[in-house]
Amino acid sequence: MLKVGYGHRMLVAAGIAAVTMLTQPDAALAEWSPQRPIQLLIGFNEGGGADALARLVADNIEGSRGWTVVPINRGGAGGGVMATLLRNAAPDGHTIGMGVTTTFSNNPFFNEGMDYSPEDFDYLATIARSQMVLVAREDAPFDTLDELAETARERGSLTVAVMGPDMERVADMIADHYDIDLRVVPTRGGAEVLTQILGGHVDAGFNGGAHHQYIRSGDMKVVVNLNSEPLMVTPEVANLRDHGIDYATNIFFQFQAPAGLPDDVREALATAIDEAVNSDGVRQLAGERMEMQLGNLGPEALSAMIMDDARISARLAGTE
Amino acid sequence: MDAALAGLADAMTLGNLLWVLAGVVLGQFVGAVPGLNAPMAIAIAVPFTYALNPLAAIAFLVGINKGGTVGGAVPAILINTPGSADSAATALDGHPMAVAGQPRKALKLALFSSITGDTFSDIVLITVSTSLAVLALRAGPAEVMALMIFALAIIPGLVGGSMVRGLAAAFLGLLLSTVGLDQASGTPRLTFGMIDLYDGLPLAAVAVGVLAVGEIFRQIFAMRPPPRTAGDDGQAGAIASGAGEADQQLTLREFVALRVTLLRGAVIGTLVGAVPGAGSSAAAFLSYAEAKRRSPTPERFGKGAPEGVAATESANSAVVGSNMIPLLSLGIPGNVTAALILGAFIIHGIQPGPLLFQEQAQLVYALFGAMIMANGMNLVVGLVGLRFWTVVVRAPATLIYPVAFLFCIVGTHVVTNSMLGVAIMLCFGVLGLLMRLFDFSVVPFIIAFFIGPNFELAVIQFLVVSGGDPAFLLGRPVALALLVLSVLALWHFGFRAHPAKKSGDGAD
């Protein structure tokens, strides 16, 4: 009986809410809040820095808004598992995803079987940028990209360790630009790239953060910056555009939802996430501990960037 | 030296002691329950340690990890359902010992061997970590590839009666390890368009399915309709009604007699664990193979030889300590568990790597202190635990196996987050049952499945780095030696030992 009574009260409350919303559309706009727990699909497996970051943002939103946010780890296929689930969820604000930019701007174009496109999502916020670089051991006979090309010509070829197909394409661009032979060595990820470089098994390799300690310890040097803006640790290193290669990587940890969110829902989510992203805890974890470049681009700039990158990916994929 | 003392003092607080104890208890528990394992518990625990101070958090996770390797031997020995590839070799001799009426002795042996291996590798970690890490770095794609070929060459000859069946099982494992995106070009293989399979068949689901559920199925099918009569109680009951108290004792003399086997296992585990990407699953088997090869009575292996348990447990526990060598001094994780712990370090603002010992020496020594505490507690908790588990296993088999099955389902769902993972586990349970019924050892299968992706990548890397030139190997003597040993091992197991195998088959 109690349950029925409670249900009646809920119905009445919902009715009042509905009437209020109908009669006061402007007030409702600013006050959207979820009707049930929000599912946060994390595009990484449990236990990593990215997972911790997503959960910290979820905690912050729960604290500031009183909403319930349930983190669910759906790693795999470079975020593709999370993106596929998210695309198939209802665009009502109760399902959002945390992942990385290239899951949307690159994967659908280069990886077979990715059943989604960048237009399938509403982009909400970024947490921080992972700055990508090409590094080599300190005793390598080259300091810059031009000198690397010179060495490759002298020796016939050089080996470059990559952490995935994205970086393999960058290696191909560099090789094409200088007309040199770069032999691409696939690895399981950034940490293994560093192992191969330190062990002297490859001549250079790509990385996005874990290399900082080796720059500071003097064991490695940055050969080229793959981003459009200067690096945090070694701002003096030239980027690809300085060398005449028209390309820059944009890799952010970011939040998105299925495309077609009502305006008030998008506004409410974006604001809640923005506040969480700018909280001390998140800034400390992403900025100081994970050594990434902080900053929320916001929904408009993030969408524009992903669409621009997607056009470049489409062009590159078409020529492959 | 000041940093070392200050660090040890930091470690020895009541709070840390309790966190280590909690980790060890949790680790031994999840290790001992079929279907659950330590990496699972660590993955779930990492986000929750955010609220702790860094030392307590890492001490807790290290405690789970160390407890998990000790606990992992329990189901392998008592009910022949190892939860991971690491403890699969423990079951080979541990379970026959238990069936022969010495379950507590087998557990004790596993516990002491485990602690010996772990302590050995911790000492190596604490004393020569940095130089060993630099040495391990010199193992490149050629060496890793050669080590895996060596492991694949010796494993099929190691278990079961037939080398051909062993090889067939190993190749099936390799084949199934190729499911998912190809590591070089990102092409999906054998995924049938299912995006959940793009990262391959989930390791936990396959391991739990083949190793534990396959055995559970076999036990359940072997049960007679009226299970109440004494003789039909199944294997678990047979264990409990085994030998008397005297037979359950592990004397110091017996343990000391195993010192060479233990030390060899600890060294093999430490070396394999220190090489990033070599795959810790191979260490236990390399140690087992070496113990069997050097034994004057190799025919006892697989039938309850204490050396078999000592060799595997000392090696797989030594991996736990030595995995921290590349992790702490280079920031490079050697296996899944180490990757999870690396994540926890970063979350707590500790960047393992070349600067760690300079910038945070005190913390590193505190961590070493916590590791030593964890070893001590592993021993105490393990001694209490083995009494507990031998009592638990006295429950009728009709209860034990269904409950274990339930834990397998729950554990797999927790770690894969999907019913697909559970479905995959059940399929591999059926495969494990069929393999057991038709006398194919599941051990070569699971080892090949685990090292498959690393092996494939090492081969690709070797081909790129060497430019496809076999002469490249001449400059890599260690790799060359391992390859030659692989050929010799195949010859040894495949041809020289063949007549003996024939007679063994006849006896069955």
Image (cartoon, coloured by chain):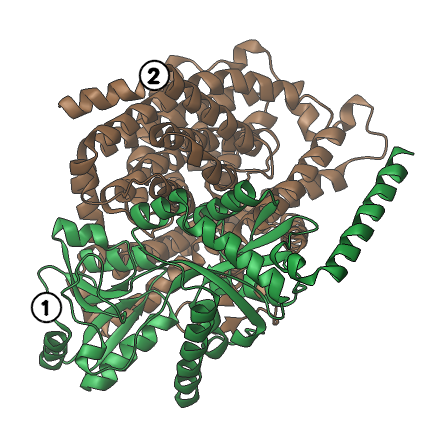
Chain colours: A green, B brown
Can the viewer see residue B445? no
Task: Pinpoint the chain carrying mark 2.
Answer: B
In this view of the protein, which residue sits in the foreground, B113 or A236? Answer: A236
- SS at circle 2: loop
Residue B89 vs A72, above or below: the answer is above
Can the viewer see residue B113? yes
The image position of residue A42, as x and y in percent, is: 52, 54
The image position of residue B80, as x and y in percent, is: 59, 35
Write down the quadrant of residue A227 in the picture: bottom left
Q: Which residue bears the numbered disc 1?
A: A143
Q: Which residue bears the numbered disc 2?
A: B13
Residue A83 vs B202, above or below: the answer is below
Q: Quadrant of the N terminus of chain A?
A: top right
Residue at image point 53% right, 43% down:
A64
Q: Give the left or right position of residue B155, taking residue A116 as reference.
A: left
Residue at image point 42% right, 84% down:
A317
